[in-house]
C-alpha cells in the first residue's frame, strides 16, 4: 500500500481458526468484561449513594472506576464481536477512534494514579494540612488536570500516528488498534516523528512515576514510625494495593510502548498488552473493595 489513504480498514489479530475456539474466546472475554462492568459499577454506585464516602480518596476512586469502565469498553467489545461473528475487520475510522479513546483513558488513569499517590501522601505524612491541601476545589482541579492531560496526549498521539504513510499492509498483530502495532505498518523512514511524540509522553509518564515512588517512600517511612501496629496495618492495606496496580500498569505499558517496532514477539506482546489494558480494570474494584472496610460496608448497605 502506498500511503494511508489507500487503507480503508485494518485486520485485527485472530485468536483462533476453529469456530469452537472462537466461541470460547468470546465467552472468556464476555466473562472478563461483565466482571469489570459489575465491579466498577458497584463502586460507582456505592460512592455516589453513600454520603459517608464523599471524601477526596473516594472521589478519586470514583474517577478511577469511570476510567476503568471506559478503558475496557474501548477494547473488549470489538474483540468479542470479531470472535462471535468470525471476522477480523475494523474500519479505518473505527481504528482511529479506538486509538484515541484508549490513549485518552489509559493516560488519564495514569495521571489519576499519580494524584491518588499525592492524596495518600498528604493524608499520612501531613494530616494536619490535609483539609487545606486536598479540599473539594483542589480535588476537582486535580481530577480535571488528569482527564485534560490524557485528552491532550491522546490528540497528539492519534494525530501523529494516523498521519503516517502505511507501507506494510493493514494487519494489526493485536486484538485492538494499538499504536506500537500500527507503527509497524508505517514506512521505515516515516515513524520517527511518532517515536518523538512517544518519547515526549514517556518523559511525562516517567516524571509521574518518580513522583509516585518518592511519595510512597515518604509514606512507608512515616508508617514505620507509627507506634500503633493496627495503624500500620491499616495504612499498608490502603497503599500496597495502589502500589501493586501502579507497578503492573507502568511496567507492562512501558514495555509495550518503548520496545522498538522492529522487534516483534507476538505472544509476549499479546500477554503484555492484556496485562496493562484488561487486568487493571478487572482487579481494581476487587483490590479496593476487599481491602477497604468502609467501602465494603457501603456496598453491603447498597445491596441490602
Image (spheres, rainbow, N blue to C red):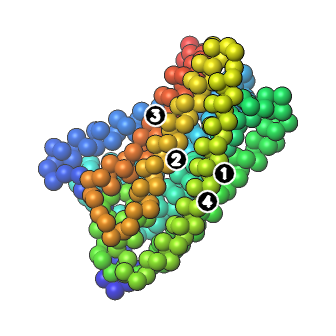
- How far apart are the alpha carbons under marks 3 and 4? 25 Å
Residue at 29% across, 75% down: 169
Q: Earlier in the sequence, mark 1 or mark 2?
A: 2
Judge depth for marks 3 and 4 and give the one in front: 4
Residue tagged by mark 3? Answer: 283
Real-space CA distance between mark 1 and mark 3, rounded to the nearest whole angstrom: 21 Å
Q: Which residue is mark 2?
A: 70
Find out whether the residues at labels 1 and 3 contact each other: C-beta distance under 8 Å: no
Which residue is located at x 43 percent, y 50 percent?
Answer: 252
Viewport quadrant of the C terminus? top right
Expressed as whole percent of the image width and height from the top left, the position of residue 166 reads 37, 79
* Real-space CA distance between mark 1 and mark 2, rounded to the nearest whole angstrom: 15 Å
Q: Secondary structure at mark 4?
A: helix
**Residues at marks 4 and 2 touching, judged by CB atoms closer than 8 Å:** no
Q: Where, by quadrant of the figure, is residue 231 drawn?
A: top right
What residue sits 46% from the left and 42% below the top?
Answer: 248
Where disc 3 sits, the SS reads: helix
Give the vertical position of 206 relative to 38 (above or below). below
Q: Which mark is residue 204?
A: 4
* Mark 4 and mark 2: Cα distance apart in space: 22 Å
Left or right of residue 61, residue 136 in this image:
right
Amino acid at each position: 500500500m502506498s500511503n494511508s489513504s489507500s487503507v480503508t480498514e485494518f485486520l485485527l489479530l485472530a485468536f483462533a481458526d476453529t469456530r469452537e475456539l472462537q466461541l470460547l474466546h468470546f465467552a472468556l472475554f464476555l466473562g472478563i468484561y461483565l466482571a469489570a462492568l459489575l465491579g466498577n459499577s458497584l463502586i460507582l454506585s456505592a460512592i455516589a449513594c453513600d454520603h459517608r464516602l464523599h471524601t477526596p480518596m473516594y472521589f478519586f476512586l470514583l474517577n478511577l472506576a469511570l476510567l476503568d469502565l471506559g478503558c475496557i469498553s474501548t477494547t473488549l467489545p470489538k474483540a468479542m464481536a470479531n470472535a462471535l461473528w468470525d471476522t477480523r475487520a475494523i474500519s479505518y475510522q473505527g481504528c482511529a477512534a479506538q486509538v484515541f479513546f484508549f490513549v485518552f483513558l489509559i493516560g488519564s488513569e495514569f495521571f489519576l494514579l499519580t494524584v491518588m499517590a499525592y492524596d495518600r501522601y498528604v493524608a499520612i505524612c501531613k494530616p494536619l494540612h490535609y483539609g487545606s491541601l486536598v479540599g473539594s476545589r483542589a480535588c476537582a482541579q486535580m481530577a480535571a488536570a488528569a482527564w485534560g492531560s490524557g485528552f491532550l496526549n491522546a490528540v497528539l498521539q492519534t494525530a501523529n500516528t494516523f498521519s503516517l504513510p502505511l507501507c506494510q499492509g493493514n494487519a494489526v498483530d493485536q486484538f485492538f488498534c494499538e499504536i506500537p502495532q500500527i507503527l509497524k505498518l508505517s514506512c521505515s523512514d516515516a515513524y520517527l516523528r511518532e517515536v518523538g511524540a512517544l518519547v515526549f509522553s514517556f518523559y511525562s509518564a516517567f516524571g509521574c512515576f518518580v513522583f509516585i515512588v518518592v511519595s510512597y517512600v515518604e509514606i512507608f517511612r512515616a508508617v514505620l514510625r507509627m507506634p500503633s501496629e493496627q495503624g500500620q496495618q491499616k495504612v499498608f492495606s490502603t497503599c500496597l494495593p495502589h502500589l501493586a496496580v501502579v507497578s503492573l500498569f507502568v511496567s507492562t505499558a512501558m514495555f509495550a510502548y518503548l520496545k522498538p517496532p522492529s522487534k516483534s514477539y507476538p505472544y509476549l506482546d499479546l500477554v503484555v498488552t492484556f496485562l496493562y489494558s484488561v487486568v487493571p480494570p478487572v482487579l481494581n474494584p476487587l483490590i479496593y473493595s476487599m481491602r477497604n472496610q468502609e467501602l465494603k460496608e457501603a456496598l453491603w448497605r447498597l445491596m441490602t
